[in-house]
Amino acid sequence: MLSKLTPLQQHFPHMDEITLLSCEFNISAFSPSLFTEHQIQLPTKLKKAVPKRQAEFLAGRFLAKCCFNQLALPYQDIMNAEDRSPIWPKNVIGSITHSNETAACGITTSKHVQALGIDLEYDINIKSCEDIYKSIINPAEEALIRATALPFNQGVTLAFSAKESIYKALYPLIKQFFNFDAVEITNIDLINQRLTLKLTKNWSTKFKQNHQFECHYIRFEKSFLTTITVFN
């Protein structure tokens, strides 16, 4: 079911203290016995889930286990909290993402890293994009995207992924959800594959309105992987 384990650190020079891997997985080849084969625990809450959900969970935890192995760390089963966010071991910061039949995971034990968020999104199709883009981006962001060489649906996909990454990075620290309008993309650099984002409201006493973040990304054939690293 799992194939093409790919290290991605070389695409993100600023993430030299983070182990980042991706893999492809085949949902049609999934079997619950793979949890036993890979020595990964299937949570009780997922035992009645559809095979797609179980396969996604397995792929993410398989990558997490590979990341732990690369860092010579003993692997501990990573369960989900009530909000479905992963519960990482003490002194480990991580993020998991999956879309269609691709998954990615990044972890670090660096004391220089405060938070990490990664997100993988396949291109929103053109028709769906026209229906939903106004819920993802504001008029200024729309103008910014349309001024780039990206097809509009790809630009909206990139914006969606970048905003998901910042939520994934900050949520473990603040434990609050925010809508897409709580963060704004202010610059898109296609050459260096980098975006600048700012908070449009106070997220916490530390992460306040106008706080800026850099989001780095890579483009696959039909998808984007975005990353947000918050350093101490």
Image (tube, rainbow, N blue to C red):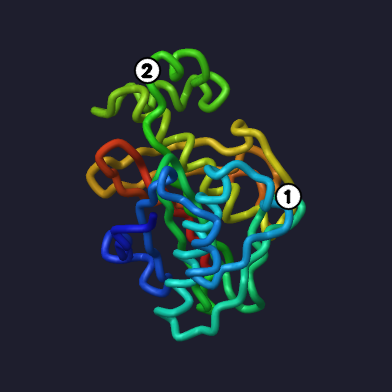
Residue 212 seen in the figure: no
At mark 2, the secondary structure is helix
Residue 166 seen in the figure: yes
- Position of residue 33 measured from the top left corner of the image (x, y, whole percent): 53, 61
Of callouts 1 and 2, the N-terminal one: 1
Question: Amino acid type of disc 2?
Answer: Ile
Q: Quadrant of residue 4?
A: bottom left
- The C terminus: image quadrant: bottom right
Instruction: Determine whether 199 is above or below 170 in the image.
Output: above
Q: Nearer the viewer, residue 178 or 195?
A: 178
C-alpha span from label 1 to label 2? 31 Å
- Residue beneath disc 1: 83
Question: Amino acid type of disc 1?
Answer: Asp
- Position of residue 129 measured from the top left corner of the image (x, y, whole percent): 44, 19
* Other-residue count near label 1 (Cα within 10 Å), few / some / many at <14 / 14–19 / ≥20: few
At mark 1, the secondary structure is loop
Could you tell me which residue is drawn at 41 percent across and 13 percent down? 127
Q: Which mark is residue 126?
A: 2
